[in-house]
Image (spheres, rainbow, N blue to C red):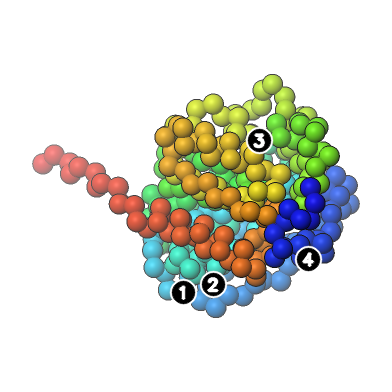
Amino acid sequence: MTSATVSPQLRARLRRSPRVPVHRAWVRGLVRFAIRRLPPVPLAGVSVEQPPGLRPGSRVHRPDSPRSNAALLWIHGGGLVMGSAVQDDRQCGQTALELGITVVSVDYRLAPECPFPAALDDCQAGWEWVQQYADSLGVDPTRVAVGGQSAGGGLAASLVQRLCDAGGPAPAAQWLHSPMLDDRTAARPELDAVRHPVWTNGLNRFGWRSYLGAEPGAAEVPPYAVPARRAELRGLPPAWIGVGDVDLFYDENREYARRLGEAGVATMFHPVAGAPHGFENWAHDTDLSREYLAAARSWLRRVLMDRPAPPAPPAPPA
C-alpha cells in the first residue's frame, strides 16, 4: 500500500504519525501513562463528570441544554491493549452537544494483563450503570445506543450480542466506527506484507492474542469474544458501520454489515475513500473527518430520536 491510496487531506498528517510497538510492555505502559494524563478537551455547552459507581476513568458527557432523553454508551479503542476513555473526550463531547444527548464513555481493563472477558464485563457494567441511573440522568432506558471505535467498536458489537441474548433491556442501536470484529483477519499471514497505515496486521495479531489468550484464528473461541464469529445475527438492533477503504478492518467490516443485512438487521455501511484507521481522531479537523462524523451522527439521531416510543404496557384489570 502506498501513500497514493491515502486521501490527499490525510497524507501529511499520516507521515507524522509514529508507529507504536505495542508488543513491548514498557511501550504500552508509557502510552497508557500518557493517555490517562491527557488534558481534558473543554467544550462549551457540555459538562464532563466522573460519577461514583462507574469504573475509574469513565466519563459522563452531558449537554447543558439536552434535547432528547436518548443516550449513548461509548467504548474507546486501543487494540484491546491500550487506551482510556479520556482520549475520546472530543468525540463524545461533540456528539453530546450536536445531538443533545447524554454520552457515557466507559473505561475498561486492558489485555494482556486482563484478557477476555474482563473488558467486556467492564463495558456491561457501564451499561448496567446507565440502566440503573437512567431516571437521574434524564435518560429513557429504551433509547440507549452502544457505540465505539476500533477495539471499542468490536467490544460494542459483542456487548450488543450479549445483552440481546440476556433478555433484559436491549440497546436501541449499535454505532460502530472501524470496529475490530474478527480475529481471523489477524490469522492471515498474507496481510502482514500490506503496509496498512496506523494499525497493521502484526499489531492486530498481538491485540487479539493478548485478548484471547491464544493465537487468533482458532477453530473455536468463547461466546462473545469475537463478534464476527457469531452465526446467528437475527434480532440485533440497527447498525451503522463506518470504515476507511484502506483500513485493515475494511473487509471484515463490510462482511459483517452484509451478514447483518441478510439477517434482517437494518444496517448502514459507510465506506470512506482513502481513509486509514482512526482518521476521524488524528485528523479530526479535516473536511473528510467532519463529513464522516456528520453522516454518522445524522444516522444516530434518526435511529434514537425518530423511532416511536415503545407502547405502554396494558393497564392491570380492574
- Residues at circles 1 and 4 in contact by the CB criterion of under 8 Å: no
- Residue neighbourhood size for the residue with mark 4, other residues' Cα within 10 Å, grouped as few (<14), some (14–19), many (≥20): few
Say which of marks 1 and 3 sits in front.
Answer: 3
Q: Which residue is mark 2?
A: 47
Q: Report the residue at 45% width, 32% height from top.
A: 263
Upstream in the sequence, badge 3 or badge 4? 4
The answer for how far apart the CA atoms under marks 3 and 4 are is: 30 Å
Q: Residue drawn 65% across and 70% down? A: 285
In three-dimensional space, the C-alpha distance between marks 4 and 2, rounded to whole angstroms, equals 34 Å
Q: Residues within 10 Å of mark 3 (few under 14, many from 20)?
A: many
Nearest-to-viewer mark from 3 and 2: 3
| Amino acid type, residue under disc 4 in the picture | Ala
Q: Give the mark nearer the N terminus: 2 vs 1.
A: 2
Q: Which residue is mark 4?
A: 12
Cα separation between marks 2 and 1: 7 Å
In the displayed image of the protein, which residue is found farthest to the left? Answer: 318
Looking at the picture, which amino acid does disc 2 mark? Answer: Ser
Q: Amino acid at mark 3?
A: Asp
What amino acid does circle 1 point to? Answer: Asp
Q: Secondary structure at mark 3?
A: loop
- Mark 3 vs mark 4: give the one in front: 4
Question: Can residue 32 be spotted in the picture?
Answer: no
Dot 1: element: loop
The tag earlier along the polypeptide, 4 or 2, is 4
Q: Give the Cα separation between the discs numbered 1 and 4.
A: 37 Å
Q: Which residue is mark 3?
A: 182
Q: Which residue is mark 1?
A: 64
